Image (tube, helix red, strand yellow):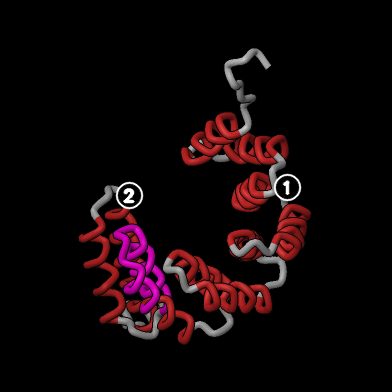
């Protein structure tokens, strides 16, 4: 029998408790019970304040509930706890972009790419930010890098479709949206985007037979 059998390992115990709390929170999200999820994640943060995953989990719940200020607060804490995490900077950039804080969003996406130059979602998200600002050349550069890595990057395809639509290239936009929708059929907004493309670019008639 091992001499360590039955011994108490505080680190392993803490890791197990974190896993239990995160699992319970994620299961609550799957059920659509964001209040219950928040309770589990809050407990995780209170019990283990140095664990960045608790804060990012709370941020995801806050975003789902439309509380962007709370999401940003949680993500800023997580970023301090994990200064080399490209993914947390990408999440922070998304929340800032959604909150209209575009300068901070750009900084966050760029920092994510400094930490992980090939981060596919940071590239796609930065491209979308540039597109929204009319900075199409910079957007195209990011999209090229993202799609060279993975031509099935859904977010990059969506960003490319939006940029193409902005520039009046209906065929390219339609191709990008259709490809993205085939890869991720849950993206219902792409069906709407395709319908809008067909409406915006259909031939118009003035009633005179011309």
| Residue at (69, 43) in percent of width and height | 168
| Placement of 189 over or under 49, stated as above or below | above
Q: Residues within 10 Å of mark 1 (few under 14, many from 20)?
A: some
Magenta span contains residue 23: no
Q: CA distance from mark 2 to mark 1?
A: 29 Å
Q: Start and end of the magenta stretch?
A: 52-73
Mark 1: which secondary structure?
loop
Where is residue 52 drawn, in percent x and y? 42, 78
Tell me: residue 181, above or below residue 42.
above
For this orientation, the residue located farthest to the front is 208
Foreground residue, 208 or 6? 208
Figure quadrant of the C terminus: top right
Q: Which residue is mark 2?
A: 30
- Magenta stretch: residue 64 in it? yes
Categorize mark 2 by other alpha carbons within 10 Å: few (<14), some (14-19), many (20+). Answer: few
Of circles 2 and 1, which is in front? Answer: 1
Judged by its main secondary structure, the magenta piece is helix
Query: For the image shown, how many numbered marks are present on the structure?
Result: 2
Q: Nearer the viewer, residue 41 or 103?
A: 103
Q: Position of residue 75 (x, y in %)?
A: 42, 76
Question: Can you say which quadrant of the picture contains the N terminus?
Answer: bottom left
SS class, disc 2: helix
Q: Where is residue 3, by image quadrant?
A: bottom left
- Position above or below: 46 against 131: below
Q: Is residue 79 left or right of residue 174?
A: left
Residue 117: image x %, image y %? 71, 71
> Who is closer to the viewer here, 189 or 31?
189
Answer left or right for 132 relative to 62: right
Which residue is label 1 attached to?
151
Residue 53 located left or right of residue 169: left
Give residue 2's quadrant in the image.
bottom left
């Amino acid at each position: 029998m091992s001499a360590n059998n039955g011994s108490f390992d505080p680190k392993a115990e803490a890791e197990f408790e974190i896993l239990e709390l995160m699992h319970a929170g994620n299961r609550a999200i799957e059920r659509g019970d964001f209040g219950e999820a928040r309770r589990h994640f809050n407990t995780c943060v209170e019990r283990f304040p140095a664990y960045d995953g608790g804060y990012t989990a709370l941020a995801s719940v806050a975003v789902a509930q439309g509380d962007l200020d709370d999401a940003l607060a949680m993500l800023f804490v997580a970023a301090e706890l994990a200064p080399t995490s490209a993914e947390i900077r990408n999440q922070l950039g998304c929340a800032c972009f959604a909150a209209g804080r575009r300068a901070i969003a750009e900084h966050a996406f760029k920092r994510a790419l400094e930490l992980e130059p090939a981060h596919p979602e940071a590239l796609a998200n930065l491209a979308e930010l540039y597109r929204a600002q009319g900075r199409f050349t910079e957007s195209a550069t990011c999209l090229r890098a993202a799609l060279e890595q993975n031509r099935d990057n859904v977010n990059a395809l969506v960003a490319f479709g939006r940029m193409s639509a902005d520039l009046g290239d209906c065929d390219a936009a339609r191709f990008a949206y259709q490809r993205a929708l085939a890869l991720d059929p849950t993206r219902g907004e792409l069906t709407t985007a395709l319908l809008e493309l067909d409406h915006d670019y259909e031939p118009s008639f003035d009633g005179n037979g011309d």
